Image: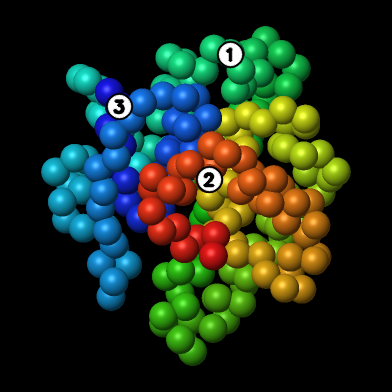
Amino acid sequence: MIKVHHLNNSRSQRILWLLEELGLDYEIIRYERDPATRKAPAALKAVHPLGKSPVIDDGEIVLAESAAIVEYLLDRHGKGEWAPARAAKTWPRYLYWMHFAEGSAITPLLLRLYLKPVGEPAARMLAAVEVEIKTLLDFVEAELGDKPFFMGDQLTAADIQMSFPLEAMRLRGEQALAYPGITAFLARIHARPAYQRALERGGRYDVIR
């Protein structure tokens, strides 16, 4: 059985979601962030030297990195339903969104996370980061358009990858109104039964609250 080393309020939630969508049996090994530092516990370093989550344990295979885990699971259990064929014209777009999530999208979010506690000395840099986040949101909104998912009508692993950075941007109030496509996308995935099951099994997930 696949074991998921699951850290609360982290990228590992989307791995639980994918496992639920695939209908696979899995075991959750839970880790909690330090309430003061918000860092992962040292116990995760016994699983992987970087001490981060997600990590899956599938027999002799221990694998980290969200996109790598997603591709691994799809290669073995996806039945060709969660990604375009590599020869398809849509494959490059799928590949782009799979890696945009942990490349372009997550970087300014991490910068905002680290700069906010610094206060006034980081104010100028933080303002630049907020401009970059708006630029990213504008871009994603335009790319989604009126499509339900990033690849069109069909949910793919690219949507699962993109869920975390968009949730972490926390669209609320007037900002949500400015991005109706993203807001609708998030509501659409949050309503999926598999997503709801993953939340029930994974526990509290403040990224979407």
Residue 101 seen in this snapshot: no
Q: Are marks 3 and 2 in contact (CB under 8 Å)?
A: no
Q: Give the Cα separation between the discs numbered 3 and 1.
A: 20 Å
Q: Secondary structure at mark 3?
A: strand
Q: Secondary structure at mark 2?
A: helix
Answer with left or right where residue 207 lies relative to residue 117.
Answer: right
**Dot 3 alpha-carbon crowd within 10 angstroms: few under 14, some 14 to 19, many 20 or more:** some
Answer with left or right where residue 89 lies relative to residue 189.
Answer: right
Determine which residue is flagged by label 2. Answer: 196
In the rendered image, the vertical position of residue 132 relative to residue 88, given as above or below: below
The image quarter containing residue 171 is bottom right
Determine which residue is flagged by label 1. Answer: 80
**In the image, what residue occupies the spot 38% across and 53% down?**
203
Answer with left or right where residue 3 lies relative to residue 111.
Answer: left
Q: Which mark is residue 2?
A: 3
Q: How is the image coloured?
A: rainbow
Q: Secondary structure at mark 1?
A: loop
* Front label number (3 vs 2): 2
Q: Position of residue 150 (x, y in %)?
A: 71, 37
Could you say which is closer to the camera, residue 128 or residue 38? 38
Residue 168 seen in this snapshot: yes
Q: Position of residue 56 (x, y in %)?
A: 30, 33
* Front label number (3 vs 1): 3
Upstream in the sequence, badge 3 or badge 2? 3
The amino acid marked with disc number 3 is: Ile
Could you say which is closer to the camera, residue 183 or residue 136? 183
Q: Give the Cα separation between the discs numbered 2 and 1.
A: 24 Å
